[in-house]
Image: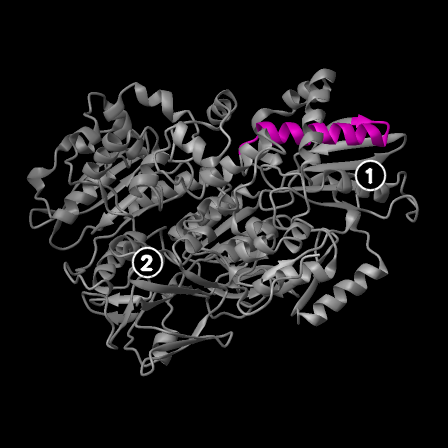
Amino acid sequence: MKRKLVLVGNGMAGVRCIEEILKLNREAFEITIFGSEPHPNYNRILLSKVLQGDTSIDEITLNSWEWYEQNGIRLFAGETVTDIDHEEQLVRTDRGRVVEYDELILATGSNPFILPVPGADLPGVTAFRDIQDCERMIEYAKTYKKAAVIGGGLLGLEAARGLLNLGMDVDVIHIFDYLMERQLDPTASKLLQRELEKQGMNFLLRKETAELFGNGRVEGVRFKDGTSIAADLVVMAVGIRPNVDLARRSGIAVNRGIIVNDYLETNVPHIYAVGECAEHRGVVYGLVAPLYEQGKVLAQVICGRKGKSYEGSVVSTQLKVSGVDVFSAGEFMDGEGTESIKLYDEARSVYKKVVVREGKIVGAVLFGDTSEGRKLLDMIQRGDSLEALSLSLLAPASSGGKESLVATMADTDVVCGCNGVTKGAICQAIAEHGLKTVAEVRDYTNASRSCGGCKGLVAELLEHMLGEEVNRYTVKETICGCTNLSREEVIAAIKEKRLMTVKEVMSVLGWKKEEGCSKCRPALNYYLGMLYPGEYDEEVESLFVNERLHANIQADGTYSVVPRMYGGVTTAEQLRKIADVAEKYNVPMIKLTGGQRIDLLGVKKEDLPRIWADLGMPSGYAYAKALRTVKTCVGKQFCRFGTQDSTGLGIRMEQTFERLKTPHKVKMAVSACPRNCAESGIKDVGVVGVEGGWEIYVGGNGGTHLRAADLLCTVKTEEEVMEMTGAFLQYYRESAHYLERTSKWVERVGLEHIREVLFDVEMRRALLERLHKALSATKDPWREIVENERLQQTLFCDLGDKEPVPVE
């Protein structure tokens, strides 16, 4: 019988520990995870990259919803544990759930510290700690232009760089004389300040905040010296505090963090703590590498293999700001009993310093050239003597003749500090698995999976091992680490060899993992469906959970149901049905969506087939990589300014293209005039009525990466709108990467190229033929399940005692 393991905290440290446990003994535990945030596990370190526009929230997800499901883990996202009863060995949550445990891991992380000054609760004041904070800043930047970041540390500077990228003017307020005083000495700090000022940041040093002021929302910051600045957005980045409230309430020993011994055990049997909430030998760590080291030790303990203990970590820091290379580790300040070796090239803005105590290397600071950072960190961790330090290590990168760093590294040297991956482990993986790209190395070894600071070193290692051959591969974007083939190569091979199943593709094309992964399986499933409409039977097990169950899974494990309302138009009869269904199944929330539909939220999985049957309406595909909705304004029938029948055209478009599978979700809109009440300018396809015709816009996005759509063409008739839209959708289906939005696809392939294809009459005709063939093979999934008892049992096997929906 499996033991019950509960993890409180769905962050990087706790989930990494679970990953280590799964590696050691996959079958030993029934695992339950609680996370207060409504997201799967994501890389919090890279939030600054999201804010800076270098990546998206989807791309920083470490473990997808499917990962939890595939590993049999119950995840309660958006649910907080409020109480631990260690006598009965159970936890209680804010939703009234009670779960028993045999072993309990606390990984509750940290809370941002908010300065206790007047005005700190005004709208427009935020921390920078989670996805919600990140989205709040992005949203604010759409309206306001003046930002102030309080805190000139690592996080504050990364936030400031992101706000600059969002088009805001940024003041950085810092109470000390120089920036990043916990990681840099004054020389490196001044070089950093000079570089960031060139990028547009304005610094207010030795400033202590007295209050935030504003009428209804924040409008400025006042300092204790009586001066003040204007600010529409204030970001507090002044530190974090271990989140120990739950532990303290539960009688677990707490100091600054939850006190743990060298095996991460608390003072209460069967309860452990790991990550930013844990205090080990008086130290609380806030960087990822020590947290992962703790997770590895704890996994051994939980699995009954108590071996090597955790004895603390030497920490290092790397700033993640575009165009600035900064590294520090260990003791970096000069002081009593220390000596230092320095190289200062002011002209090139390069500064290198190694600190020595009693003949041993104990710390380093690098600015401008951080390539030796990893090597120096290894020397500090090993306690190498000064004799081991070659002065060539400090030579400027441009001095020539410098030996390749990776060539000089020992196999035991660590390349990825976050995940503890050595050069030897990477070389072995490259040799044994034929790895050719940094992404493949990441997938096999975890190197560069966290902060990404070692990507350059991994690339250098690939080049060192593969020589010129590496160039042939690094420029190619493979579908995932399971193959060396690109999307184009896979599709060409599927056509040439007429491969008909996901399994067949993997087998014939030499997939490295027999079962593939959560990235390639859905992609192959889509490509096969796109290539063989009507012939290919979609593989249910290769679909994301939302598409498999034809409803959106929500943070609390319930689902949402969105019936189709063509063009946003409904009837009294449909409204009555929806109201009756909501009442019958005790739907806790009924909400209007931004796409002019009605969302029934909080539906139990086992109720889904009956709700669909009772509604008798088609699926709105609110969960799918397909056409979602066509938003419309009221049009010329009712609007005084409308020049066209936008509602009629919107309904026609939705009825024509509904159920069409696409590489990513597609949203459309039709506006009756350039006032654009349907927001056509930020849709994948937007149609705007003008005098005598229609304008068609493509590639818009109203999400995280806001993008105005491009004008594709102007046409005179509704028939031409349907034709151009259909051809556009089919070309997108055939040439985009799976999970690539039209906004990214249009930028990648170019609007002019798309026009060349669509304006060619023969090519457009061929595209439309393939489109209509695909459309003719579609079925409404809700109706299909309602009418098929076997499908109900397969997809909803946990219906329990409930009878399946009667099949007509």
Side (left or right) of 459 relative to 790: left
Residue farthest along the bottom direction in this orientation: 87
Nearer to the camera, 710 or 140: 710
Q: Residue at x 21, y 39 (%)?
A: 425
Residue 716 falls inside the magenta stretch: yes
Specify the amino acid type for callout 1. Pro
Q: Which residues are magenta?
A: 714-737
Q: Residue at x 67, y 61 (%)?
A: 806
Which numbered tag is attached to residue 18? Answer: 2
As drawn, 40 above or below 470: below
Q: Mark 2: few, some, or many residues within 10 Å (few <14, many ≥20)?
A: many
Marked residue nearer the N-terminal end (1 or 2): 2
Secondary structure type for disc 2: helix
- Which part of the image, by quadrant, shows the C terminus? bottom right
Q: Residue at x 84, y 57 (%)?
A: 571
Q: Mark 1: few, some, or many residues within 10 Å (few <14, many ≥20)?
A: some
Residue tagged 1: 674
Residue 751: quadrant of the picture: top right
Specify the amino acid type for callout 2. Ile
As drawn, 607 above or below 162: below
Secondary structure type for disc 1: loop
